[in-house]
Image (cartoon, grey):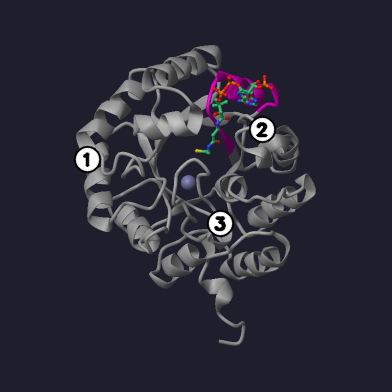
């Protein structure tokens, strides 16, 4: 039987956060509905962050509330930088959040204005306050940082251990500015699997240096549990210089289909959605498939 690959769409968060022009709530919801209709089952739908830091996410509560109502059967979650964000998620009945902390302390300060000690203290508070909520950690800059460069894998392991000691069992390894290469991804995934055999790992890959697909495949072949991507290859962190789009979901689905993997996602409707959204969302789409003429 073909191996099932779990794809997590993060465009509604990572994609939109990097767009300057505000995308209205109805449009965000249409986008989420379209992704769900294409067979996407796991989706990061927004982030509960300061609207001063990310103006695009000022409508997070409205988007999340509606999406949760429309898709009660899907795995929908949000990114939070602090207890306040987790509280908002909890208040509207969201069951799962991911707390972003960067492996690089410089990026953590640029992104959420916290030291590592402060961020881990906040994570402890979130775990304590909401024992009924799934709390994973998004490890930003896990494969390298625009300020600090490459970070040794041992530092990643100690970082994960700190969160593990607070009860966290799910992590997303984020290549925030696309600095990873396939050999490094393989090595990192093998190492964390070996050190934390009872944890679930996701890979969040950016295509900044044209290695997005290769890195994603390396993560899959090394046995990662979930891979993240964005429709049309939107995405990027506004607080990381040089950040650009993620691996495009439709390109990823196409590659995996061609290789005989099972994704449960309908490629045709996903590409149709990407083409359609390209006309409406004021942003750069860097996916490849949507640029191939329909007749080709
Ligand atoms: N949701 C909504 N508003 C929030 C919030 C949250 N989770 N956390 C803080 N705020 C508000 C505060 O109420 C305050 O508003 P005010 O100025 O109107 O009183 C303001 O944001 C600043 O709060 P403070 O606690 O002093 O935070 P800060 O200025 O030190 O910023 C963060 C820290 C984490 C809130 C902010 O940097 C942030 O939201 N960053 C998100 C970055 C991000 O999403 N990056 C991309 C994803 S990796
Ligand atoms: Zn990202």
Query: Percent position (x, y) of residue 161?
Result: 29, 24
Residue 1 seen from this side: no
Quadrant of the rendered image containing residue 209: bottom left
SS state under label 2: loop
Confirm if mark 1 falls within 8 A of ligand 2: no
Of 166 and 225, nearer the camera is: 166
Residue 154: mark in rendering: none
Give the quadrant of residue 212.
bottom left
Instruction: Mark 2 or mark 1: name the one nearer the start of the chain.
Output: 2
Quadrant of the rendered image containing residue 38: bottom right
**Front in this rendered view, residue 155 or 98:** 155
Q: Is residue 103 above or below residue 174?
A: above
* Residue at image coords 34%, 54%: 220
Residue 191, labelled with which disc? 1
Q: Residue furthest right?
A: 26
Q: Is residue 79 magenta?
A: yes
Can you tell which mark lies on residue 51?
Answer: 2
Q: CA distance from mark 3 to mark 2?
A: 20 Å
Circle 3 or circle 2, nearest the eye = 2
Q: Is residue 155 left or right of residue 292?
A: left
* Image: magenta residue range: 77-93
Q: Residues within 10 Å of mark 3 (few under 14, many from 20)?
A: many
Q: Is mark 2 within 8 Å of ligand 1?
A: yes
Give whichever of 195, 264 is nearer the camera.
195
The residue that label 3 is drawn on is 234
Locate residue 252, reporting x and y percent: 46, 63
Identify the residue at horizontal 66%, vertical 32% (top origin): 51
Mark 3 C-beta to ligand 2 under 8 Å? no
Where disc 3 sits, the SS reads loop
User: Considering the numbered disc 1 on the image, is that residue within a helix, a strand or a loop?
Assistant: helix
């Amino acid at each position: 039987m073909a191996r099932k690959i779990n794809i997590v769409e993060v465009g509604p968060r990572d994609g939109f956060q990097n767009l300057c022009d505000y995308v209205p709530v109805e449009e965000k919801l249409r986008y989420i509905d379209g992704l769900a209709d294409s067979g996407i089952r796991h989706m990061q739908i927004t982030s509960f962050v300061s609207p001063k830091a990310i103006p695009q996410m000022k409508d997070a509560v409205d988007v999340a509330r509606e999406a949760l109502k429309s898709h009660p059967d899907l795995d929908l979650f949000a990114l939070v930088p602090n207890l306040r964000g987790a509280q908002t998620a909890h208040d509207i009945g969201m069951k799962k959040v991911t707390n972003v902390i960067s492996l690089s302390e410089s990026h953590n300060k640029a992104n959420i204005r916290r030291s590592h000690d402060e961020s881990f203290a906040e994570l402890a508070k979130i775990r304590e306050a909401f024992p009924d909520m799934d709390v994973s950690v998004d490890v930003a800059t896990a494969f390298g940082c625009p300020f600090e460069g490459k970070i040794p894998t041992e530092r990643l392991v100690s970082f994960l251990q700190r969160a593990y000691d607070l009860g966290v069992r799910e992590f997303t390894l984020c290549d925030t500015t696309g600095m990873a290469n396939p050999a490094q991804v393989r090595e990192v995934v093998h190492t964390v699997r070996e050190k934390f055999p009872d944890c679930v790992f996701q890979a969040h890959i950016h295509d900044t240096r044209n290695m997005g697909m290769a890195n994603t495949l390396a993560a899959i072949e090394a046995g990662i549990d979930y891979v993240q991507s964005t429709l049309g290859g939107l995405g990027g962190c506004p607080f990381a210089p040089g950040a650009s789009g993620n691996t495009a979901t439709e390109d990823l689905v196409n590659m995996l289909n061609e290789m005989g993997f099972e994704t449960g996602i309908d490629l045709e409707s996903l590409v149709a959605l990407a083409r359609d959204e390209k006309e409406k969302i004021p942003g750069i789409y860097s996916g490849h498939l949507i640029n191939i003429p329909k007749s080709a």
